[in-house]
Amino acid sequence: MKKLFVMLAAVGLIFTSCSDDDENGPSISNLTVSIGGLEDLGGDFAYEGWVIVDGSPVSTGTFTVDGSGNLSATTFEVESSNLESATMFVLSIEPVPDTDPAPAATKILAGAFDGSSASLATSTIGTAFDNATGKYIIAAPTGTGAANEEFSGIWFLDNSSGSAVAGLDLPELSEGWKYEGWVVIAGTPVTTGTFTDPLVADEAAPFSGANGGPSYPGEDFLNNAPAGLTFPTDLRGTTAVISIEPDPDNSTAPFTLKPLAGAIPSTLSGNPYSIDNNVLASFPTGTVSR
């Protein structure tokens, strides 16, 4: 057998199946990520980057973000052919551990490559957030009408015409996201409920009274006060927020995406009140380069 091997080698009949790339592995290039405004997801979730190659996602790796907004990694090794052919970069939020090799529905940022870089925006969640507006009333219609309940509820509706209509003008969200209303009371954010459609009531009423409420997102803070708070309460001088939350969501606090936020006036002169557009202050932005 040894003699046969030598003879075959001598006449060039023995080949290797590996090219230079196979012997040394595929050519690798670096993808650099620069993103501001991301928040710490805790231990149950991580961010994962993807490049879109021939219409299919290819993972570029995962990273976490600390409480100061610092990324655990900013440079990722990607097969050169994939990086050169990529048309888009997408950033998703993935569970930890993650048993699904495909991107989750919660895609927070994306951008098309223009040459060697891509500018990232939240277009994967929805569009026209810059035009989002909101109005609300301060009232507690689910209560008994007691004097100490007067300022203990917020409802995102507009009754300026004499009839209640939707108070929130928000774009439709993509899969994997929900809106959530909040009031920050004595430094504690308290939910008014999650919803996907601002034209109907939200999904829960954990603090409201026994009477029926308006058919729009909102809450009366009359019962079951969280630790450290007392209900009924007085919402004057507190802060109202509409956030965009990952679904599923592992946090009881508002997510970083807050398209609407603003102070509730300390002196109320009659409903409704406007809530400010907060997109520039809260939405993450960034770039990737290859």
Image: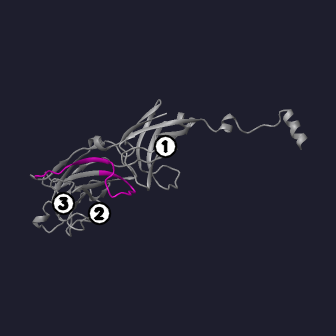
- Marks 1 and 3 sit apart, C-alpha to C-alpha, by 43 Å
Q: Where's residue 256, x and y in %?
A: 33, 48
- Label 2 is placed on what type of residue? Ala
Q: Which residue is mark 2?
A: 204
Task: Tell me if I can see residue 116 in this picture.
Answer: yes
Q: Indicate which label's residue lies in the foreground, 1 or 2.
A: 1
Q: Where's residue 258, x and y in %?
A: 29, 48
Q: Which residue lies at the image location 40% right of the left edge and 54% below the top edge?
A: 42
* SS under mark 2: loop
Q: Which residue is mark 3?
A: 153
Q: Are the two marked residues, 1 and 2, in contact with CB atoms closer than 8 angstroms?
A: no
Q: Quadrant of the N terminus?
A: top right
Q: Are the two marked residues, 1 and 3, in contact with CB atoms closer than 8 angstroms?
A: no
Task: Tell me if I can see residue 86 in this picture.
Answer: no
Query: Mark 1 vs mark 3: which is more N-terminal?
Result: 1
* SS under mark 3: strand
Q: Indicate which label's residue lies in the foreground, 2 or 3.
A: 3
Outermost residue toward the top?
115
- Marks 1 and 2 sit apart, C-alpha to C-alpha, by 35 Å
In the image, the segment drawn in magenta is 243-267
Q: Is residue 14 left or right of residue 211?
A: right
- Marks 2 and 3 sit apart, C-alpha to C-alpha, by 14 Å
Q: Where's residue 58, x and y in %?
A: 53, 43
Q: Nearer the viewer, residue 66 or 138?
A: 66
Residue 89, placed above or below residue 153: above
- Label 1 is placed on what type of residue? Trp
Q: Is residue 258 left or right of residue 79?
A: left
Query: Mark 2 vs mark 3: which is more N-terminal?
Result: 3
Residue 111 is drawn in which quadrant?
top left
Q: Which residue lies at the image location 62% right of the left edge and 37% below the top edge?
A: 26
Tell me the tag on residue 50. Answer: 1
